[in-house]
Image: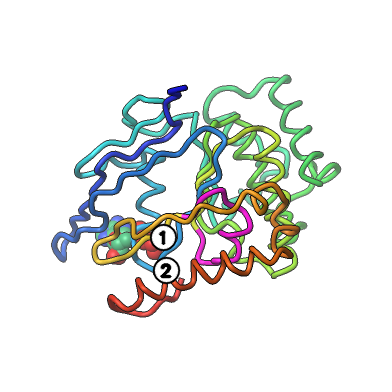
Amino acid sequence: MAIAPVLELQQLSHVYVNAKGASLALEQLDLRVERGEFVSLVGPSGCGKTTVLSLMAGLFPPTIGNVLLDGEAVAGPSSKVGYMLQQDFLFPWRTIRDNAAVGLEISGRKTPRTMEIVDELLAELGLPDSGRRYPYELSGGMRQRVALARTLATEPEVLLLDEPFSALDLHIKLQLEDLVHETLTRRGKTAVLVTHDLAEAAAMSDRVIVLGRNPGRIKCEVVIDEELRALSPMAARKLPSFQATFERLWAELDAVDDEGGSYNG
Ligand code: ADP
Ligand code: MG
């Protein structure tokens, strides 16, 4: 059964050019992400994780190589891809409901029917009666749930998540990991998560890609055990094989470290 991967990086290299000169941020990345897969990218600060997501999102073209989405070269932002960041970027003057509908508005798809989807999403994400409230009335964890609703409202196939939990308190973070994992799994979404938290990567992913730096490249890939993948992130953390996976990732990152610099997320 030869199904094309939903997302594919082919020999991807990226050079940033600015007033200070040119720097090679990524070198020859190859990656295939299958439909419904949850893949995490981990690696030291500056190894190019955000650059990879930006290229996947079509925010700018790679210097060399291709990004394919459903087998087609990405030439710019696509409604098939949703992006969720550490900062929620909610508009303070808009209600929660209107914030969640921003993507629909921008893409000209705001209708009574799609607003029903927004209301369903807010309810499903545990924000049933907060639609008329404003962002300042919500906690950080609730605001990130609104950001998730906003991302899902446009029904993207692929979600790109750049450290979406890293500004949250630990127990809120664990709850949101479960909520995001369950919501995406139930909908059959494909996800690429950037995180500096190795436990989060081990708990949430089907596969973890470890990146090295100078220049950014793929060091290795760790496939998560089936028994961990079958569970929610919170439940997976309690299995003995979780600790082993964490230690394996830690060792891989230590190996990256030995090549220079310190690992600080
Ligand atoms: P990460 O997300 O893993 O911390 P980034 O993708 O943000 O890494 O950055 C990778 C490298 O590219 C870093 O060395 C960073 O300084 C550099 N870089 C990122 N964005 C730019 C930019 N707009 N202009 C120049 N250099 C950049
Ligand atoms: Mg980054």
Identified by mark 1, the residue type is Val
Image quadrant in which you'd find residue 143: bottom right
Q: Residue at the location (38% across, 58% down)?
A: 220
Q: Residue at the location (33% across, 64% down)?
A: 212
- Label 1: how many Cα within 10 Å (few below 14, some 14–19, many 20+): many
Are dots 2 and 1 in contact, CB under 8 Å? Answer: yes
Residue 112 position, x and y percent, is 73, 20
Dot 2 corresponds to which residue? 252
Residue 204 sits inside the magenta stretch: yes
Q: Is residue 62 above or below residue 164?
A: above
Residue 37 position, x and y percent, is 54, 40
Q: Is residue 248 above or below residue 178?
A: below
Q: On the picture, is 160 further left or further right than 204?
A: left
Residue 177 sits inside the magenta stretch: no
Residue situated furthest right in the rendering: 129
Q: On the picture, is 204 further left or further right than 171?
A: left
SS for tag 2? helix
Dot 1 corresponds to which residue? 210
